[in-house]
Amino acid sequence: MELLSKFSNYAENAIEEENPTVERLTAERKKISKLNIGDPAKFFPTPRYMIDAYIKALNEGRTSYVEPEGIPELRDAVAARYKRMYSEDIDRHSIFITHGVSEALIFMNSMFIDPGDMAVLFRPYYSVCYTGFRVFGGEPILQSYQEDRNWDLDTDELDRRIKDHKRSGKKIKYISITNPSNPTGMVLERKVLERIVDIANDNGLVLISDEIYDEVIYNGAKFTSVSGIAEDVPHIIFNGASKDLDATGFRIGFVIVPGEDKVSEQIRKKMVDYCSMRLCVNTPAQYAVAEGINNIKEHEREVGAFVRAIEERANFAAKLINESEYMRVVPPRGAYYLLPRLNMDRLTIRDDREFVHRLLEEEQVLLTRGSGFGADNHVRLVALPTKEILEYSINKINEFCRKHSR
């Protein structure tokens, strides 16, 4: 008897697939440069005011179950943040607290996708959860960013492809964007977002916007939230504490469904059901994040220093990569990732999967294969480590490439 569903084959995580090799090398007392996972708390300790708020919640005995949709204090804090940053009036009852954006995506795909349904995903994408609709039997419409145009997007082609699929009888449920982008570090311009909103509206699609890096912006980029331009389109915004508040392990995400239309109301009602199924999110962490959002002075000081450091490190890494004869990268403008393209014609390595595995084995530098993000012959690395670690690691990558050059 076949026990597992055929769709379960799509449950995977390219970022952590080399963990068994890491465990073995660590047991052999090898020191590994880990540039594979975007965990800021590993390199920039979670701010003291966030830690103190967590301890305060524990000392006050805030350890019981709370409201499934999230405590009112946190939902009000999220609403106040969007009012302060984006001049948007969002009601508490339009905000839901989840175990990070990862759980939010599981909720959304379970809510929207039946076998054979489609969703629009822009490639390169964050692979861990955004291809998760395949676990529910969904099929992707993959629209590629244009690397040679600084990861620009051909929105006219996107509109044509959606209409072609609809004419063939396919049921398309939503368009999903991540802005700023993981893994490219690209920040979408307002005019591109406005065009995507128009396409979603013309084709009757829900728009999902992951904005979890909305304060990690640099190199002259300007961030635009979908909340200010998608008022006539059913839309969902993802955000959370992991990146801007440097609290990855707190596992606090925000789902915002602000529309007044019937579709948005239907989504909100179903979100209540999904939240109630898992009882609640980490209680003391919710109180801590609420205080963290409301402590504007401390937050602005911490996030300002954090972004300045990321900008310096990302630009430093991009310069080193672009000096290599084996790699090229579009410098990022948001988040903290770089996605270099490997010059495979100059290497004896078969593909990016082999490249990542052998680099780890031979040089003890850990990256993530670009094919895990829909970008063949690329690798993703994070710009969170110090400049010294980044320089050492990129030099090791170049040494590896020279050893395996044609």
Image: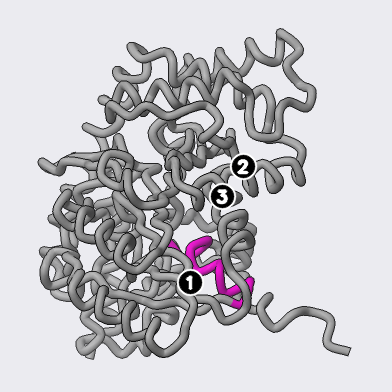
- Residue 283 locus on image (x, y percent): 69, 26
The answer to whether residue 311 shows anywhere in this view is no
Q: Which comes before the other along the chain, label 2 or label 1?
A: 2
Residue assigned mark 2 = 99
User: Residue 343 bears which disc, if any?
Assistant: none
Residue positioned most to the front: 262
**Comparing marks 2 and 1, which lies closer to the viewer?**
2
Query: Is label 2 in contact with label 1 (beta carbons under 8 Å)?
Result: no
Q: Which comes before the other along the chain, label 1 or label 3?
A: 3
Q: Tell me if residue 7 comes above or below residue 174 in the rendering.
A: below
Residue, x 44% and y 54% (percent of image)? 34
Residue positioned most to the right: 1
Q: Residues within 10 Å of mark 3 (few under 14, many from 20)?
A: many
Q: Tell me if residue 348 comes above or below residue 280 in the rendering.
A: below
Residue assigned mark 3 = 267
Q: Which comes before the other along the chain, label 2 or label 3?
A: 2
Q: Tell me if residue 60 comes above or below residue 308 in the rendering.
A: above
Q: Residues within 10 Å of mark 2 (few under 14, many from 20)?
A: some
Over which residues does the magenta segment extend? Answer: 126-137
- Residue type indicated by callout 3: Ile
Residue, x 20% and y 60% (percent of image)? 195
Assign the N terminus to one quadrant of the image: bottom right
User: Residue 361 bears which disc, if any?
Assistant: 1
- Residue type indicated by callout 1: Glu
Q: Secondary structure at mark 3?
A: helix
Residue, x 39% and y 77% (percent of image)? 141
Would residue 52 appear left or right of 386 to someone viewing this image? right
Would residue 8 appear left or right of 22 to someone viewing this image? right
Q: How far separated are the C-alphas under marks 2 and 1?
A: 34 Å
Q: Quadrant of residue 168?
A: bottom left
Q: Residues within 10 Å of mark 1 (few under 14, many from 20)?
A: some
- Residue 254 locus on image (x, y percent): 51, 38
